[in-house]
Every structure is written in structure tokens, then in C-alpha cells.
Image (spheres, rainbow, N blue to C red):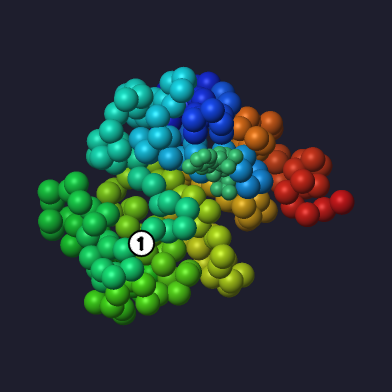
């Protein structure tokens, strides 16, 4: 059984059905990406997996346990962490306090301290500025903090929503290479990205979402070379 299994998931906002019956899975150790244009339903999917939205129908199984009806806090404690679209760091709290909040369910304070140090090793800028308000960080640095914070819950699956959004090309490279490093260390990742090229280049599997459905699935490599994907998402004619 895969670490995450999503079967025929449907999610609506009132009468608007944003996700119309999608099925996919994520194996332990994989990077899986959901790509597609704005409004395709990618964020809605992640928010539903996190327990922030209730599905209309469908079955979600994580680490062998059903997630339907499970609260958002419990889902974090089961090992599913979410670095949301727009980062959502706490701008007035310090960088260190933001990281500590990512560990709010953990009781092992020594382990938390160790993992904060690991976050500073991974992202030295966060360590240098750990006492400063997180709102003083640049967009890319805030993204590092959002990822560091999500990792503080020691997730079995890390969900990243648009980590490269609004970043300079250099910062985007840095974030993508961090995702590659996390993958090399065995972290399982579900990645939602507008930047299809970068996401497919590092993903084991990918799914193209179009208006609430999955229109095409394949390995990252297959989708990267698929003609329809190249035309629609990689800006080729
Ligand atoms: P984006 O990259 O813009 O976030 P997305 O693929 O993640 O795109 P969603 O944000 O999941 O797409 O949106 C899917 C659909 O649901 C869109 O039609 C959107 O307008 C609609 N939608 C999203 N959030 C809400 C909401 N809070 N209330 C009503 N409709 C919503």
C-alpha cells in the first residue's frame, strides 16, 4: 500500500465543485507533483488532505489509516505536514518562534532543539537571523522558513504548495535544490507547482490537473517530454 492513497476525491465550495473525482497515490520516498493552471484544484486538494476542507466523497488513506473525518491537528500528528500557498509565516514572531510552532505537537524538547539546529544548517540565513521578526525576511527566505517549519513536525509526507511562487530565478533554484536534497534524504513530498519544468524535472511521478480532474499522469520524465504538456505548460508551440 502506498503512503498516501487518494481515491475518487471530490471537493466543493458550496455549489462550485473544485475537485471532481481525482485518484492518485504517493509511495514512501517519492516526489509526486501536481501541475496545472490556476484554478485547476491543486490547492483545494492539498487543503483537503490536511483536513482543512471536507470532501464531498472519496477515500483518503495515509500510512494505512483513513483520513476522512480526522481533524487537522491529528493529521499533522499522524505525519502529514503542509507548507501552504503564500507561506503563511507569522510575520511578527521571530524566525525561531515560527520554527517552534511547527513542532507544537511534539513533546521531545531535546529533539525539537536538535531539529531547529538542523533547519539552521540547511538554511544558514535563518540561523543568522533567528531572533528577528520573520516578516523582515525576503520572499525566498520566508519560503525557506515555511519549509523549515513544516519539517519541524518530522513529517512522513511533506506537502509543498507553490514553493517557487513570486521568487527570483536564483531563489527558485535554491528552493528547488532544497527539495532535491530533501528527496535524497528520503523525504516523501507532494509538490504543487506552477513551474512545471522544475517540478517535473525532480518528480518521480506527476499528474496534470485541469478544471478539477487529472487529465494526464506519468513519470516526471514522461510528462516533461509529452508534447501536450510541453505546449500547455512549458511554453512551447
Ligand atoms: P492556484 O494555483 O490559483 O491556487 P489551484 O489549482 O490550486 O490554483 P484552487 O485554488 O484549488 O486551484 O481552486 C480550484 C477552484 O476552486 C477554482 O475555480 C477557484 O476559484 C475555486 N475556489 C478556490 N477557493 C475557493 C473558495 N474559498 N471559495 C469558492 N471557490 C473557491
Left-right relation of 79 to 164: left
Left-right relation of 107 to 231: left
Residue at the spot 29% in from the left edge and 29% down from the top edge = 70
Q: Name the residue under label 1.
A: 89
Ligand 1 image position (quadrant): top right
Label 1 Cα neighbours within 10 Å, binned few <14 / some 14-19 / many ≥20: many
The N terminus is located in which quarter? top left
Is 47 situated above or below 201?
above
Residue at the spot 28% in from the left edge and 78% down from the top edge = 132
Is 119 situated above or below 154?
below
Where residue 59 sits in the image (x, y, percent)? 43, 21
Is 33 situated above or below 69?
below
Residue at the spot 50% in from the left edge and 63% down from the top edge = 175
Outermost residue toward the right? 237
Left-right relation of 64 to 103: right
Residue at the spot 27% in from the left edge and 54% down from the top edge = 102
Is 230 situated above or below 101?
above
Where residue 222 sits in the image (x, y, percent)? 71, 39
Where residue 104 sits in the image (x, y, percent)? 20, 51
Q: Identify the secondary structure beneath mark 1.
A: loop
Residue nearest the observer in this picture, 197 or 237: 237
Amino acid at each position: 500500500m502506498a503512503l498516501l492513497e487518494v481515491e475518487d476525491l471530490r471537493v466543493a465550495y458550496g455549489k462550485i465543485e473544485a475537485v471532481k473525482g481525482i485518484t492518485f497515490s504517493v509511495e514512501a520516498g517519492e516526489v509526486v507533483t501536481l501541475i496545472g493552471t490556476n484554478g485547476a484544484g491543486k490547492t483545494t486538494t492539498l487543503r483537503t488532505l490536511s483536513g482543512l476542507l471536507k470532501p464531498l466523497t472519496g477515500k483518503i488513506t495515509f500510512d494505512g489509516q483513513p483520513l476522512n473525518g480526522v481533524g487537522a491537528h491529528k493529521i499533522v500528528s499522524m505525519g502529514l505536514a503542509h507548507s501552504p500557498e503564500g507561506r503563511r509565516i507569522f510575520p511578527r514572531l521571530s524566525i525561531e518562534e515560527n520554527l517552534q510552532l511547527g513542532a507544537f505537537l511534539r513533546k521531545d524538547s531535546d529533539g525539537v532543539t536538535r531539529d531547529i539546529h538542523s533547519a539552521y544548517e540547511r538554511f544558514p540565513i535563518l540561523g543568522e537571523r533567528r531572533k528577528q521578526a520573520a516578516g523582515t525576511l525576503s520572499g525566498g527566505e520566508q519560503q525557506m522558513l515555511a519549509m523549515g517549519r513544516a519539517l519541524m513536525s518530522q513529517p512522513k509526507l511533506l506537502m509543498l504548495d507553490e514553493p517557487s511562487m513570486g521568487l527570483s530565478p536564483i531563489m527558485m533554484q535554491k528552493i528547488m535544490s532544497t527539495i532535491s536534497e530533501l528527496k535524497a534524504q528520503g523525504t516523501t513530498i507532494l509538490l504543487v507547482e506552477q513551474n512545471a519544468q522544475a517540478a517535473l524535472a525532480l518528480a518521480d511521478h506527476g499528474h496534470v490537473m485541469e478544471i478539477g480532474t487529472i487529465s494526464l499522469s506519468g513519470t516526471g520524465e514522461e510528462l516533461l517530454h509529452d508534447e501536450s504538456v510541453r505546449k500547455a505548460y512549458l511554453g512551447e508551440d
